[in-house]
Amino acid sequence: MKKLLITIDGPAGAGKSTVSRALAERLGYRYVDTGALYRGVAYVARHRGVAEQDDAGLSDLLDALALNFILGNTGQRLTANGEDITDAIRTPEISMLASAVSARPVVREVLLRVQRELGRQKAAVFEGRDMGTVVFPDADVKFFLDASTRTRAQRRFAEAKDPSAVSFEAIERDMRQRDRQDSTRALAPLKAAADAVVIDSTELTIDQVVEQMLAHVRGVLDRG
Ligand code: DC
């Protein structure tokens, strides 16, 4: 059967990660979370004291940085020069810093190459912000997954490991700020590709979204 390259773009909290992982599993495809790469750069910059606007510093950092996805016992892990950073990149601070460094051309340029290399074998679901618009404009199937800001913030709040340590208001405020940054930056802003299938998940369960996507993918596969 033909191996497809599938892209899923959309704002934070729309359900992209869960849906992308499930879709990849159903198809027997690889799942690539490209936001984790931006988070990895942000994490290493934070630890080396490189500021988000310091393009020369970011460039040096990127020259010596190897980000790798590794399949371990507990699912997919991300390493930065061998260090497992999977859990460390999931903090509100790194979310915001990832959004900031992702606006720097020097960062996007390097990660563009990394992502295209990861996509060469196809049979993969790539999740991010500019997968269908910039990184894989010729992808076989493109989805854009959206949901209302309130719903997305509620989902993030429900996912919080310690809900007493975060407020719903702070999550919603950070989300709005990140959406604004990600969709207004000059380079590769968050937006649906003209040929993307747009799905609004506000009123849908994860399973319903995955089924809609699978139906579309099967249609593409049937057409050969
Ligand atoms: O999907 P995420 O929340 O883990 O992504 C973190 C940040 O990385 C997001 O705010 C914007 C940036 N990003 C990007 O610019 N392009 C991508 N393809 C993926 C993420």
Image: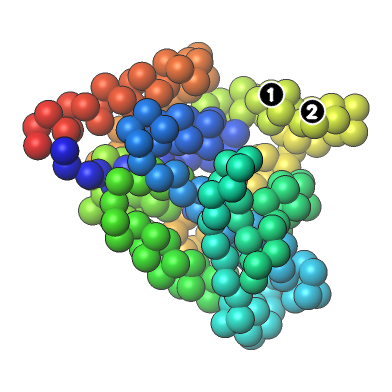
Residue lying furthest right: 164
Q: Judging from the image, what secondary structure is the residue with disc 2 in? A: helix
Q: Which residue is at 39% across, 51% downward?
A: 131
Q: CA distance from mark 2 to mark 1?
A: 7 Å
Question: Is 115 situated above or below 49?
Answer: above
In the image, 146: left or right of 37? left
Q: Quadrant of residue 166?
A: top right
Work out whether mark 2 precedes mark 1 in sequence or the reverse, and give the earlier one: 1
Other-residue count near label 2 (Cα within 10 Å), few / some / many at <14 / 14–19 / ≥20 = some
Residue 206: mark in rendering: none
Q: Residue 13 placed where, x, y %?
A: 60, 34
Residue 154: mark in rendering: 1
Q: In front: 176, or 84?
A: 84
Q: Quadrant of residue 29?
A: top left
Q: Which residue is at 84% across, 27% downward?
A: 163
Residue 7 visible in rendering: no
Q: Which residue is at 72% across, 33% downward?
A: 172
Q: Which residue is at 34% across, 57% downward?
A: 119
Q: Residue 177 placed where, x, y %?
A: 68, 46
Q: Residue 201 placed where, x, y %?
A: 48, 22
Question: Is 54 situated above or below 165?
Answer: below
In the image, 48: left or right of 71? right
**Quarter that holds the C terminus:** top left
What's the residue type where badge 2 is placed?
A: Phe
**Quarter that holds the N terminus:** top left
Residue lying furthest left: 223
Q: Are marks 2 and 1 in contact (CB under 8 Å)?
A: yes
Q: Judging from the image, what secondary structure is the residue with disc 1 in? A: helix
Name the residue carrying label 2: 168
Q: Residue 56 placed where, x, y %?
A: 64, 85
